[in-house]
Image (cartoon, grey):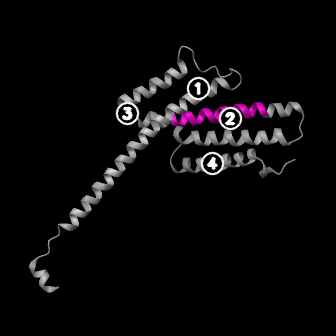
Amino acid sequence: MAVYYESSWSILSTIGLVNFFYAWIVIGITRLSWLSAIPAIVSAAGAVANGLCYYAWYMNSDKAKTAAAYAVADILWMIQEAGLSFYSYIILKQVLQNKVRRIFLILIKSIFTGKEAFTDVVNGAHVGYFFSLACVECLSAFFLLRVFIKAKKTSEQLSISLEVDIHSRFSKRVVSPDAKKDW
C-alpha cells in the first residue's frame, strides 16, 4: 500500500476537504443559499471521489468493492464538474443584465435542450456530459470575463475620479493673508 500523501488522489481529496470546511465558514458568515452551498457540495464530491479512487487503487479489496468505489467516484466527479458549471451559471444569472443576460440564458438553454440535446449523460460513460460541461464552461468563462473586465474598468475609473477629487479638495484650500504673516 502506498503512503497516503504520495498519491495525487489523496492530495486532491485533502484539498477538497479543506475547501469543504472553508465553504461552511463562508456559509456561517453569510447565509445558506445556492451560491454559498455549491462550493461545499462540489468540494465534498471531489474529496470523496478522490478518496474512493485512492481506496480502489491502493487497497487490496475484492473486485466488487473496487468496482463500487470507482462507480461512486465517477458519479461524484460528475457532481463536481457539473457543480462548477452550475456555480458559474448562478453567478452570471445574478450579475448579467438586459440583453447580455438574455443572450446568456438562451445559449445555456440551447445547450441543454437543443435539437440534438447534448445531455445524453451516459453516452460512452463520460463523453456526453463532458461535452455539455465544456460548452457551458466556455460560455460561462466568456461572460464572466466580460463582467470582470467591466468591473476592473469601473474600479479604475472610480480610483482616478477619487484621486482627482482628493487633489482638488486639498489644492483649493486658501490661506488668509493674516495666517501667512504668522508663519
- Residue closest to the far left: 177
Placement of 143 over or under 151, stated as above or below: above
Circle 2 SS class: helix
Circle 3 SS class: loop
Q: Magenta residues: mostly which secondary structure?
A: helix
Near-viewer residue (182 or 35): 182
Q: Quadrant of residue 128?
A: top right
Q: Residues within 10 Å of mark 2 (few under 14, many from 20)?
A: some
Residue 57, position as x, y percentages in the image: 83, 39
Q: Report how far apart the C-alphas of labels 3 and 1 lie in the structure.
A: 24 Å
Residue receiving disc 2: 77
For the record, the magenta segment spans 70-88
Q: Report how far apart the C-alphas of labels 1 and 4 lie in the structure.
A: 25 Å
Residue 2, position as x, y percentages in the image: 84, 48
Q: Report how far apart the C-alphas of labels 4 and 3 lie in the structure.
A: 30 Å
Residue receiving disc 4: 19
In the rendered image, residue 82 lying in the magenta stretch gets the answer yes
Q: Earlier in the sequence, mark 3 or mark 1?
A: 3
